[in-house]
Amino acid sequence: GVKPDIASESFNPLDLSNLLEVNRLQIRLRPFLGELPSTTLAMLLWALARLDLLNNFSVDMLLEIDTIVLGLEQDLTWQDIGRIDYAIRKSDDRTSESGSLISTRRQISECLVGASRVAVFELHSSSSQNNRLPGELFLSIGKDQGLPRPSSDTVLVVDDAELAAGLEQRGYTVSVWGRFAAAGCTCSVQVPPQHCPGGAVLR
């Protein structure tokens, strides 16, 4: 059959199921592994593991792959981390053949933990920024632009402490219902007992 062009931008790792000769496959892959973007490499390793090919690679090839992965820690997305972790676990049986492979696998484990922390922080930061935008937009509305004037009626603010603080600064009486625990803030499954005739603001 037609062999996939590894260098092509349209290369699909799943096409490797047509390459039955593992040694030939390793020879074809070796020149390109170090040039692949982290996401492409992660998908490739995942596909090789799913096809039970990675576990048949030589120890030298596995060490080369490990070295490349270790150099990509700062570029890995959470999807990449999951795919690489799967691939590494699928070929862990080979560590008994090489002390060097045991060492690199230990390093990769630490690398993936570090990359996971970075990915979680980035996701949290992005989520927090997106969640803040509606409140910031609401607070940017001036009194002469339609924002209701403060009254003695309590306003219920859900999940947005910054918005609550902003409303208090503008003279509103505020009750906060935090449904999620974060940054030292406790949460509650129940609406605060205060009556809030002034309305509610949802994030």
Image (cartoon, rainbow, N blue to C red):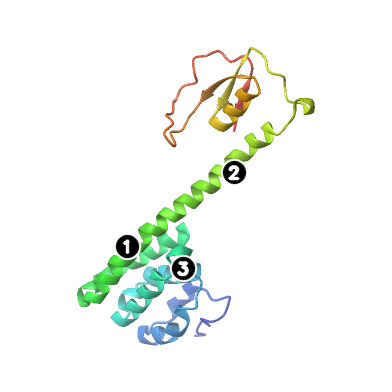
Q: Amino acid at mark 2?
A: Asn
Question: Mark 2 — residue?
Answer: 130
Q: Quadrant of residue 157?
A: top right
| Mark 1 burial class by Cα count in 10 Å: few <14, some 14-19, many 20+ | some
Q: Position of residue 119 (x, y in %)?
A: 46, 55
Question: Mark 3 — residue?
Answer: 43
Q: Earlier in the sequence, mark 3 or mark 1?
A: 3
Between marks 2 and 3, how big is the CA–CA gap? Answer: 29 Å
- Circle number at residue 203: none
- Above/below status of 8 relative to 144: below
> Which of these two is toward me, 22 or 123?
123
Q: Position of residue 57 (x, y in %)?
A: 33, 79
Question: Which SS class for mark 1?
Answer: helix
Q: Position of residue 170 (x, y in %)?
A: 66, 23
Residue 160: tell me if it is visible.
no
- Above/below status of 21 relative to 138: below
The answer to whether mark 2 and mark 1 are in CB contact below 8 A is no
Question: Mark 1 — residue?
Answer: 109
* Mark 3 or 1, closer to the camera: 1
Question: Which SS class for mark 2?
Answer: helix
Between marks 2 and 1, how big is the CA–CA gap? Answer: 31 Å
Q: Residue at x 39, y 82 (%)?
A: 20
Between marks 3 and 1, how big is the CA–CA gap? Answer: 18 Å
Q: Amino acid at mark 1?
A: Ser
> Which of these two is toward me, 36 or 121?
121
Q: Position of residue 92 (x, y in %)?
A: 27, 68
